[in-house]
Amino acid sequence: MRRKRFFSGVGKSEAEIEFALNAGVKCFNMESIPEIDRIQKVAERLGKTAPVSLRVNPDVDAKTHPYISTGLKANKFGIAYADALEAYRHAAQQPNLKIVGIDCHIGSQLTDLSPLVEACERILILVDALAAEGIVLEHLDLGGGVGIVYQDENVPDLGAYARAVQKLIGTRRLKLILEPGRSLVGNAGSLLTRVEFVKHGEEKNFVMVDAAMNDLMRPALYDAYHHIEAVEPKNIPPLTANIVGPICETGDFLGKDRTIACEEGDLLLIRSAGAYGASMASNYNARNRAAEVLVDGGGYRLIRRRETLEQQMANELACL
């Protein structure tokens, strides 16, 4: 099988590096000088050569939520742009490392793609400077970050982005690698939940549902918007309410101040849950993670069983 997997992340352990080398990883995206030295040490011990690139922080403002902005000087990710040449020189001196590329990722949920183009421009300046020193790269990994429409965002112009990158790369012999992620799967998934109660409060109304922040963390974590609608609209007066779960946190909400017509027992659909939904789910408040169903046209099939309390507790050890 051809090697296809990249290994990114700011805190790779020696055990993880060893596993990846033995599995034939395509490339490590290294993010610090200590990590360069660690991968060299593990590769030398195993008698292997590690294919590597450096994740360079181009200091470009992605103009997205601070929690998902990853390309600024203050962020934990990557090698500082000003330090990148020296870091590459250091990596080039390691006998068990093979430099194959350069990587960057400036943030997530970008609908204005001009920061991605700016990052590409800055990275290509480094590519040329490295080539002048005899460090010739095989690939350019521009990361991901292309956003989707959750509410009223602009639809990203992927064609314009592709043309801009193609023009910038020009005649350089670089394989281009992109990480589309959310833009492929974000709007392909929805969370289905049932209304438990409709509660009329003194200042707020609440639609209490059986899904919660443990199932879909984004609203509580980022104050993110997800469109919520009734599966079967009813001819009843709508109300404006917060859509909330049963977890013991005030931050356990899925939507705020939504106008919706629903009552106890109704099913609601929470859209755009295909990215950072199930992958961020947890067992907080001892809640079981939800089942996942793949819908294909008029057919469907279960692809992840609903978790049971016995499975959740299986690794607990009794203290006598």
Image (cartoon, helix red, strand yellow):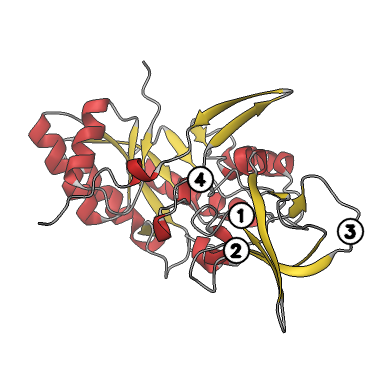
3D distance between C-alphas at marks 2 and 1: 7 Å
Tell me the tag on residue 304: none
Q: Mark 3, residues whose alpha carbon is within 10 Å: few (<14), some, or many (≥20)?
A: few
Helix, strand or loop under label 2 = loop
- Amino acid type at circle 3 is Ile
Q: Does dot 4 land on a helix, a strand or a loop? A: helix
Across and down, in percent, residue 18 comes to: 18, 36
Task: Name which of mark 4 and mark 3 comes first in the sequence.
Answer: 3
Which is closer to the viewer, label 3 or label 1?
A: 3
In the image, what residue type sits under mark 4?
A: Ala
Q: CA distance from mark 4 to mark 2?
A: 22 Å
Q: For the residue marked with disc 1, what is the amino acid?
A: Gln
Q: Earlier in the sequence, mark 3 or mark 2?
A: 2
Can residue 132 be seen by looking at this rendering?
A: no
Residue depicted at 11% across the width and 29% down the height? 47
Judge the density around disc 2: few (<14), some (14-19), many (≥20) Cα neighbours within 10 Å.
some
Badge 2 amino acid: Thr
Task: Judge the density around disc 4: few (<14), some (14-19), many (≥20) Cα neighbours within 10 Å.
Answer: some
Decide: is 272 above or below 253.
above
Residue picked out by circle 4: 278
Residue in the foreground of this view, choosing between 320 and 193:
320
Can residue 101 be spotted in the picture? yes
Q: Nearer the viewer, mark 4 or mark 2?
A: 4
Look at the numbered discs 2 and 1 and tell me whether their residues touch, using CB distance below 8 Å.
yes
Q: Residue at x 34, y 42 (%)?
A: 310
Q: Quadrant of residue 86?
A: bottom left
State the image coordinates of residue 274 (x, y, percent, origin top left). 60, 43
- Circle 3 sits on which residue? 236
Q: Tell whether label 1 touches label 3 (CB within 8 Å).
A: no
What mark, if any, has residue 64 been given in the picture?
2
